Image (cartoon, grey):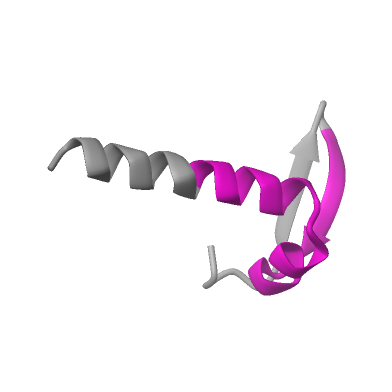
Amino acid sequence: MEMFDHILVLSDGKIVEKDSHKELLDKNGFYRKLYLMQNQKLVKEQLYSI
C-alpha cells in the first residue's frame, strides 16, 4: 500500500477517507483500524504456524 500516491477507503459504497498510506495511518480512522486488524491476524497466523 505504501507505493500508492493515494488510497480511497470505501464503506457502504462511499468514500470515507482518501490520502496516502502514511497519512491514513496517522489519522487513526477507519483505514488504520482495518490495517491494524489485518496485521494482528497475520502475526497470529505466523505464531500458530511455528
Q: In this orientation, which residue lies closer to the viewer: 33 or 17? A: 33
Residue 48 quadrant: top left
Q: Total number of numbered labels? A: 0
For the residue pair 19 and 43, the one nearer the viewer reads as 43
Q: Is residue 25 magenta?
A: yes
Residue 35: percent from left, percent from top = 59, 50
Q: For the C terminus, give its image quadrant.
A: top left
Q: Residue at x 68, y 46 (%)?
A: 33
* Residue 36 forms part of the magenta stretch: yes
Asked whether, in this view, residue 7 is left or right of residue 28, the answer is left
Q: Position of residue 31 (x, y in %)?
A: 71, 50
Q: Is residue 27 above or below residue 11?
A: below
Residue at 71% across, 70% down: 20
Viewer-proximal residue among 43 and 21: 43
What segment is highlighted magenta in the picture? Answer: 14-38
- In this picture, residue 46 sits left or right of residue 40: left
Q: Position of residue 21 (x, y in %)?
A: 65, 67
Residue plotted at (36% across, 47% down): 43
